[in-house]
Image: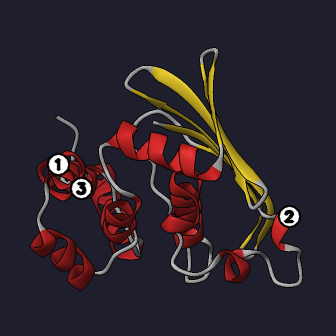
Amino acid sequence: MLKQLTLTNFRRIENDTMNFSEGLNVIRGDNEASKTTRIESILYAFFGSKGLREPLAKVVTYDKPENSLKVELDFTYDGVDYHIKRGKSGAELTYGDQSVTGQTEVRVFCERLFVCSADTAKQLVIADQNSVRGVLAQGGTAAGSLVERLADLEVIETLIDKIQTQLSSGNTKQLEAQVAQLEQNAEDAPEM
């Protein structure tokens, strides 16, 4: 479970902290609101530059030095709390009284922890349908295992159905008019 993400000079985000709550978190916003940027920054925390779509020099905020880019991520996995700090100058992952230091060392630790390579994670997390098809066509136990764990679509579909039946979404003017009409009918109804 993700807990907190702090970004410094990552794409358009110069300084921001995002806190996650328990359970399902949804990142929603207009185009160019930094949704994909935040997801990519999480991949960067776990896998370093191998988690990026572009070289690090193109990811740092425009007109800022490359070494000013920093990502910090707090998360819990299998009941263990982890903290990752990563930037151009280095990476460190800490958990309990243990630590892993170095760009490659932290990436390899995360690949082993999640049983997933950086390339597979990047293709699945920031992907269009054709990219996902490509990962699946490549086969491999890592891709299959990750897809099985992440794509519990039945649970997501059930959640969406419940939300749609219990909560209004989109333009609610028609629904509000129906409620007003029902309230008026109730007031006009004879008492029993």
Q: Nearer the viewer, mark 1 or mark 3?
A: 1
Image location (x, y in percent) of residue 106 = 56, 44
Image location (x, y in percent) of residue 12 = 74, 76
- Dot placed on the residue nearer the N-terminal end, 1 or 3: 1
Residue drawn at point x = 20 percent, y = 45 percent: 149
Q: Could you give the CA–CA distance between mark 2 and mark 3, rounded to whole angstroms?
A: 40 Å
In the image, which disc is placed on residue 68? Answer: 2
- Dot placed on the residue nearer the N-terminal end, 1 or 2: 2
Q: Secondary structure at mark 3?
A: helix
Q: Nearer the viewer, mark 2 or mark 3?
A: 2
Circle 1 crowding by C-alpha within 10 Å: few under 14, some 14–19, many from 20: few
- The residue indicated by pointer 1 is 145
Image location (x, y in percent) of residue 66 = 82, 72
The amino acid type of the residue labelled 1 equals Ser
Residue drawn at point x = 55 percent, y = 83 percent: 31
The amino acid type of the residue labelled 3 equals Ile
Circle 2 crowding by C-alpha within 10 Å: few under 14, some 14–19, many from 20: some
Q: Secondary structure at mark 2?
A: helix
Q: Could you give the CA–CA distance between mark 1 and mark 2, rounded to whole angstroms?
A: 36 Å
Residue drawn at point x = 42 percent, y = 20 percent: 79
The amino acid type of the residue labelled 2 equals Ser
Q: Could you give the CA–CA distance between mark 1 and mark 3, rounded to whole angstroms?
A: 24 Å
Circle 3 crowding by C-alpha within 10 Å: few under 14, some 14–19, many from 20: few
